[in-house]
């Protein structure tokens, strides 16, 4: 999954000796939901405005 996960655990345990994988996952879970909602809204708005994905890369969506 994430290559730096062990490093994150090591830094987290520097401040909380009882921290484990579950502690870090439960700490980051609210951020995951917020990012998912914000990025979903962003892609919906982007598609509704018909903006291109990049230079020379138009976005075509046919429902």
Image (cartoon, grey):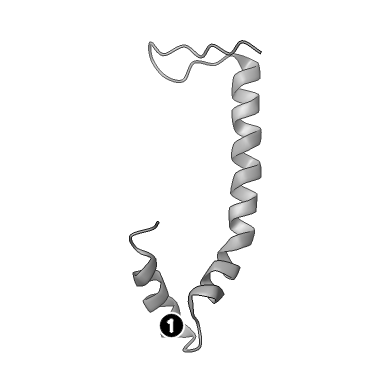
The answer to which of 54 and 21 lies nearer the viewer is: 21
- The answer to whether 34 appears left or right of 13 in the picture is right
Residue depicted at x 63% and y 36%? 40
Residue marked by disc 1 = 13
Residue depicted at x 54% and y 74%? 22
**Residue 46 appears at what percent x and percent y?**
59, 23
Quick check: 36 above or below 29?
A: above
- The answer to whether 41 appears left or right of 20 in the picture is right
Residue depicted at x 65% and y 25%? 45
**Residue 58 appears at what percent x and percent y?**
47, 11
Query: Dot 1: what SS?
Result: helix
Quadrant where the N terminus is found in the figure: bottom left
Quick check: 61 above or below 34?
A: above
The answer to which of 10 and 51 lies nearer the viewer is: 10
Q: Residues within 10 Å of mark 1 (few under 14, many from 20)?
A: some
Specify the quadrant of the image occupied by residue 23: bottom right
Residue found farthest to the bottom? 17
**Residue 62 appears at what percent x and percent y?**
61, 10
């Amino acid at each position: 999954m994430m290559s730096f996960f062990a490093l994150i655990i090591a830094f987290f345990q520097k401040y909380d000796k009882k921290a484990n994988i579950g502690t870090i996952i439960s700490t980051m879970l609210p951020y995951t939901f917020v990012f998912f909602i914000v990025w979903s809204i962003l892609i919906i708005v982007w598609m509704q405005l018909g903006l291109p994905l990049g230079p020379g890369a138009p976005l075509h969506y046919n429902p």
